């Protein structure tokens, strides 16, 4: 199938190195200590953060750092077929782990020993790139909760179809079965915290695809920073500064 | 700018889901006019001017008039992405041609109207998809008109009456394709127009049928609904129609539902179906099966006579002519026969040929109706109308089929383009290439981008690569025909201290450069093989690979894939190993040089000693192969000597086979067998092998009949028995044995590639080589099968992973089928090229030659001319007095005798023949054989 027309347009009209439109909103879940809704095109994810708070299960308590827990789920209405999916299936467990590890890399856990931070992420609408969207949403929610972080982690994916590296695959492109590289970075430190790939790629092509995904992460970082800045300004304004 | 499209979609299981897709609208899509002030003109292709308008073309025009669009005169065309999408959904082959046009140097520009912020239209409530798309086309045309206002005229070309009306209402300039082409004033363009079938009626005059006398010639095709239900109930059978290449009045439909081939005799039973069409067939009542056949034979006699052609190399090349006596005796008539009741899918494309000679109509310049005769005999004559008859009569032209009404004897079509003058070498060569579906276009830039940078040489990384063995110290050499530039095989032979020999076959390591899934690999896979014509070669791989990087030339380091044996002096293989290697050939010998070295007893240099040692081994191996029952068949391969400047043939003669040829061949066979064993062991289900089916008794019938007529009894019970009886077939005539072998060769079918998972091991047999397993490994530069086998071998050694296609058996099978098709076409093209040059050669040189009678006919006989490798009919009676002449045929003895008993000719008899090129009709030269008493 033709995913990139000879005119250089993808099925949805983007060019190969263009991302989908990004929207984000902080404080969507009032009860949580911090929350965010993050949208990348039609992929929509909500994240809520509780903590730092007392460790619920004493046996898991860590003396030198905070315990980070993460729960990922997908709303039954998030995909077209609205199937009832059991909670805690393999895929969710895996993604929960991926998100947790990415977040642990940026949270300054040593500042909050003997405490617990819970991150809940739910996919409201899935259209490819859910993993990246979850990480970006979680980053925003953590920032909203005021949890000390080295930096915000951002994530983006890139694929390779019709011999072309493509940034930020949507669902149709993702289900083509081609390689899909998801990268998470700490943009200022220029460190990679997450790297996943489905399928196989020759080494030289892999490098270009990963490079593209990294560029995507940096662009997202810029957007997120602006969103956070805006939000802070508004808070300041409301406080009547 | 973002726009969300949402629509409901029904899945295959019947579930209905709502699908939401993003649809981005952009402001960076440009109009493509080169001097537009508003747009970025980097990729612009259109020239905007008042003189020639910019054409916006509707889908229906593209679908019907693609040949016209391909004409260089049609320029400055805007293709909207919605049009491309509609065309893609309706006809993929036209879509591909359209895309090729956009990539060519023509001024065609694709405008992505669906993603442009001003030209995207949303489907309105109650509007059908079709209406919405029509509106999108109009909106885009309107946009162009305003956008280019003043700078150029914009014309919407549509043949949809409603669309045109609305366009004019909206103030868009719109015209039909007919009126546009007429306004250009070019008669040749008008010829290319496809006319709607209603305009067809007046074309009947070409058949000399007055409108009042129009009658139904073919029965109506059944409607699709009836066909579907008939197929369902098992009264109709579906299959692909294949027309006999040598008898266009006989066709076969392979039907899965009855598990046999249904034979269709005669044009009226074929009912307007073309070769390759998917048809629905109804079986005829059993008692008519025989009758239909004799009817077909009667019809056949009207057909033009058979011409002089090359001696067939196998049963696939041999004309399947039905002689009267055969039809009464063989069982063939008990095979089911049927008639076509409907065509499910047409395989119409364009055909190469020329117009049937006809007088010019009185008032020239007007429209003439002519009959087009295709070079491919399977295709019926095609009626076309032309305004340039005078121009076309002596040309090779391409014609496409448009329709075939049941009221007309012939299908109607339209002129596409002229190739050149009939009989001209370049024209006829192009015809050969087109006829055999051979892609001789230069390689695309994407393919060339896959080549390593030049000049290429073996790198230190190659040498230090652990998978590669350094064999540069070996005395490796190659033996090929003189002037060979694509050297894909080399050999070495070293005497070991223990008295044994180490013998190696080193093959160009093509897969080191051709990686799976690259455009280069796709192209090679499509081409399948290099094609060798008399005066040129059409490569499977680009020239730098073919002649330089892969070619194992002398004195340069090259990468190779090696098979190395340890052999006893009795040529028994003790061990076999396979490795990628680096070699440095010390000599590229021609067959003649190699032979001369071996024969010259004064030469004692190491290379000559190697050659002699190998020759001794090869002779033993060959002997052993023959004892196992391998057939030594003879073919009449012809060699031309070509003038280097004019490319005209200077001399013609049989290809001489020397011991050196046989020596190289023997080791290549051995390497192929060794590799076949290795890959099959490792990949029993997805290996690519080559098999040669055992000929049936029915196939050998012509050989047996001829042999019986000269009192020779052949045992065909096994390949061994046949080989033995061929050996013992020696008459007092020194040429007799060779003649019998040539006759045997043409009874065999050709060997074919197959995927090992598709057949059971006993079927893997290669009959001709008497080898239970065989494959192709030794010519990867010019055969794609060898490329696949190289990958399999590398994977079996654990060097590389097996590419993913090997896990997909249907795809592997289709690759094997394509290779067989390409291989066969390449051979036919080579033969056609030789035939063409034979005619050119004899055009200026009428010659006498000795010939052998190979078959007796009712009005003469077929002779084989050994010196030139051709065969053809010699007529004793004039065609007009057929049957009633002074000659009669004795079928039993295979003799033709004069009534008064003064003269008789029998099969295999030597006769003197006069060869001359004649032109019975203007511009239709052909080689004629006459008896020279
Ligand atoms: Zn413009």
Image: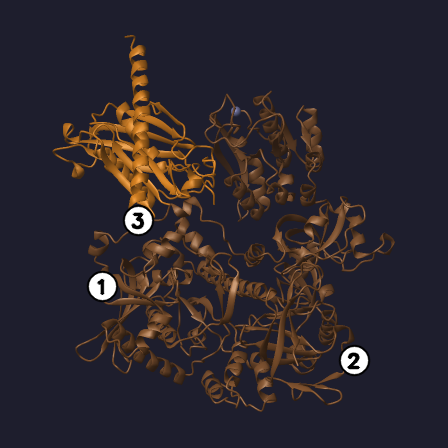
| Neighbours of disc 1 within 10 Å: few (<14), some (14-19), many (20+) | some
Image-quadrant location for residue B145:
top right
Which chain is drawn using orange? A
Say the numbered circle drawn on residue B884.
Answer: 2
**Image coords of residue B434 (percent x, y):** 56, 55
Q: Secondary structure at mark 2?
A: loop
Q: Secondary structure at mark 1?
A: loop
Q: How many marks?
A: 3
**Image coords of residue A49 (percent x, y):** 28, 29
Q: CA distance from mark 1 to mark 2?
A: 74 Å
Which chain letter goes with mark 2?
A: B
Which chain is drawn using brown? B
**CB under 8 Å between callouts 2 and 3?**
no
**Image coords of residue A205 (percent x, y):** 32, 43
**Image coords of residue B924 (percent x, y):** 67, 61
- The vertical placement of A62 against B880, above or below, is above
Q: Which tag, 2 or 3, sits closer to the chain's start?
A: 3
Say the numbered circle drawn on residue A127.
Answer: none
Which chain letter goes with mark 1?
A: B
Which chain letter goes with mark 3?
A: B
Say the numbered circle drawn on residue B455.
Answer: 3
**CB under 8 Å between callouts 1 and 2?**
no
Q: Which residue is mark 1?
A: B471
Q: Point out the image quarter for the C terminus of chain B.
A: bottom right
Q: Is residue B581 visible?
A: no
């Amino acid at each position: 199938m033709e995913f990139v027309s000879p005119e250089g347009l993808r099925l949805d009209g983007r060019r190969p190195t263009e991302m989908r439109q990004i929207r984000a909103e902080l404080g969507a879940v009032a009860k949580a200590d911090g929350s965010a809704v993050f949208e990348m095109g039609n992929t929509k994810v909500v994240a809520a953060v509780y903590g730092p708070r007392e460790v619920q299960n004493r046996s898991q308590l860590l003396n030198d750092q905070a315990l980070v827990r993460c729960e990922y789920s997908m709303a039954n209405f998030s995909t077209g077929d609205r199937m009832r999916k059991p909670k805690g299936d393999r895929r969710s467990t895996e993604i929960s782990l991926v998100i947790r590890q990415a977040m642990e890399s940026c949270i300054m856990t040593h500042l909050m020993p003997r405490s617990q931070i819970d991150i809940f992420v739910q996919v409201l609408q899935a259209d490819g790139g859910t993993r990246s969207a979850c990480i970006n949403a979680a980053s925003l929610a953590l920032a909203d909760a005021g949890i000390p972080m080295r930096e915000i982690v951002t994530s983006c994916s890139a694929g390779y179809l019709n011999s072309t590296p493509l940034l930020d695959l949507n669902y149709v492109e993702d289900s083509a079965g081609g390689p899909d590289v998801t990268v998470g970075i700490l943009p200022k430190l220029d460190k990679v915290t997450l790297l996943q790939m489905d399928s196989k790629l020759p080494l030289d092509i892999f490098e270009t695809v990963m490079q593209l995904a990294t560029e995507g992460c940096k662009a997202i970082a810029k957007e997120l920073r602006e969103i956070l800045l805006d939000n802070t300004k508004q808070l300041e304004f409301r406080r009547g500064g | 700018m973002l726009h969300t499209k949402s629509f409901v979609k029904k899945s295959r299981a019947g579930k209905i889901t709502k699908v939401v897709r993003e649809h981005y609208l952009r402001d960076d899509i440009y109009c493509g006019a080169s001097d537009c002030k508003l747009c970025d003109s980097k990729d612009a292709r259109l020239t905007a001017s008042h003189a020639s308008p910019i054409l916006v073309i509707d889908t229906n025009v593209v679908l019907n008039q693609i040949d016209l669009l391909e004409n260089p005169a049609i320029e400055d065309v805007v293709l909207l992405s919605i049009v491309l999408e509609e065309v893609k959904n309706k006809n993929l082959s036209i879509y591909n041609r359209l895309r090729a046009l956009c990539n060519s140097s023509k001024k065609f520009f694709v405008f992505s109207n669906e993603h442009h912020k001003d030209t995207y239209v949303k489907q309105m409530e109650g509007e059908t998809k079709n209406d919405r798309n029509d509106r999108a086309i109009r909106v885009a045309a309107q946009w162009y008109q305003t956008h280019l206002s003043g700078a150029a005229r914009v014309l919407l070309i549509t043949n949809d009456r409603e669309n045109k009306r609305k366009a004019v209402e909206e103030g868009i300039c719109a015209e039909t394709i007919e009126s546009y082409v007429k306004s250009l004033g070019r008669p040749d363009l008008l010829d290319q127009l496809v006319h709607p079938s209603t305009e067809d009626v007046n074309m009947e005059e070409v058949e000399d049928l007055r409108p009042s006398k129009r009658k139904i010639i073919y029965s109506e095709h059944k409607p699709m609904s009836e066909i579907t239900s008939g197929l369902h109930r098992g009264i109709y059978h579906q299959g692909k129609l294949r027309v006999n290449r040598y008898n266009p009045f006989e066709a076969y439909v392979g039907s899965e539902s009855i598990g046999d081939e249904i034979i269709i005799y005669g044009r009226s039973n074929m009912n307007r179906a073309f070769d390759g069409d998917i048809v629905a067939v109804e079986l005829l009542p059993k008692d008519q099966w025989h009758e239909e056949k004799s009817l077909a034979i009667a019809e056949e006699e009207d057909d033009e006579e058979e011409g002089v052609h090359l001696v067939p190399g196998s049963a696939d090349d041999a004309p399947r002519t039905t002689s009267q006596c055969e039809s009464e005796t063989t069982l063939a008539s008990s095979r089911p026969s049927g008639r076509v009741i409907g065509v499910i899918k047409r395989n119409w494309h364009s055909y190469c040929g020329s117009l049937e000679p006809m007088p010019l109509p009185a008032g020239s310049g007007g429209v003439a109706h002519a009959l087009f005769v295709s070079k491919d005999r399977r295709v019926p004559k095609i009626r076309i109308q032309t305004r340039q008859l005078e121009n076309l009569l002596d040309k090779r032209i391409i014609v496409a089929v448009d329709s075939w009404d049941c009221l007309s004897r012939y299908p109607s079509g339209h002129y596409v383009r002229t190739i050149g003058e009939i009989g001209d070498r370049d024209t006829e060569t192009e015809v050969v290439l087109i006829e055999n579906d051979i892609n001789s276009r230069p390689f695309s830039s994407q393919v060339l981008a896959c080549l390593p940078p030049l000049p290429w040489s073996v790198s230190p990384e190659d040498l230090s690569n652990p998978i590669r063995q350094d064999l540069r110290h070996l005395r490796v050499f190659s033996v090929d025909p003189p002037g060979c530039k694509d050297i894909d095989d080399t050999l070495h032979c070293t005497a070991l201290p223990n008295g044994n020999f180490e013998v190696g076959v080193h093959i160009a390591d093509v897969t080191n450069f051709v990686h799976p899934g690259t455009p280069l690999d796709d192209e090679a896979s499509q081409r399948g093989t290099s094609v060798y014509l008399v005066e040129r070669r059409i490569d499977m791989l680009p020239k730098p690979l073919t002649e330089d990087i892969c070619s194992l030339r002398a004195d340069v380091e090259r990468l190779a894939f090696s098979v190395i044996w340890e052999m006893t002096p009795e040529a028994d293989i003790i061990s076999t190993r396979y490795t990628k290697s680096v070699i440095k050939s010390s000599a590229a010998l021609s067959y003649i040089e190699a032979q001369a070295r071996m024969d010259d007893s004064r030469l004692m240099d190491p290379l000559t000693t190697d050659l002699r040692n190998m020759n001794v081994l090869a002779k033993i191996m060959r002997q052993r192969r023959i004892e196992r029952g391998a057939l030594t068949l003879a073919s009449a391969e012809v060699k031309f000597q070509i003038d280097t400047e004019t490319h005209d043939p200077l001399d013609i003669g049989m290809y001489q086979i020397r011991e050196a040829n046989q020596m190289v061949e023997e080791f290549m066979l051995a390497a192929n067998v060794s590799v076949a064993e290795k890959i099959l062991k490792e990949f029993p289900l997805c290996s690519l092998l080559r098999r040669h089916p055992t000929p049936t008794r029915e196939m050998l019938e012509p050989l047996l009949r001829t042999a019986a007529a000269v009192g020779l009894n052949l045992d065909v019970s096994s390949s061994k028995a046949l080989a033995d009886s061929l050996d013992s077939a020696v008459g007092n005539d020194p040429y007799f044995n060779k003649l019998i072998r040539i006759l045997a060769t043409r009874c065999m079918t050709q060997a074919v590639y197959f995927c090992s998972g598709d057949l059971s091991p006993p079927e893997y047999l290669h009959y001709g080589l008497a080898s239970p397993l065989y494959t192709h490994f030794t010519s990867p530069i010019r055969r794609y099968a060898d490329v696949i086998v190289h990958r399999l071998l590398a994977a079996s050694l654990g060097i590389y992973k097996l590419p993913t296609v090997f896990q997909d058996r249907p795809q592997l099978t289709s690759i094997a089928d394509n290779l067989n098709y390409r291989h066969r076409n390449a051979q036919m093209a080579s033969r056609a090229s030789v035939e063409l040059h034979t005619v050119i050669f004899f055009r200026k040189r009428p010659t006498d030659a000795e010939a052998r009678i190979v078959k007796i006919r009712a009005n003469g006989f077929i002779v084989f001319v050994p010196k030139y490798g051709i065969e053809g009919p010699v007529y004793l009676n004039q065609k007009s007095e057929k049957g009633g002449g002074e000659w009669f045929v004795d079928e039993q003895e295979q003799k033709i005798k004069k009534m008064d008993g003064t003269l008789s000719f029998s099969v295999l008899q030597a006769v003197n023949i006069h060869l001359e090129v004649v032109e019975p009709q203007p511009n239709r030269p052909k080689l004629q054989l006459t008896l020279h008493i």
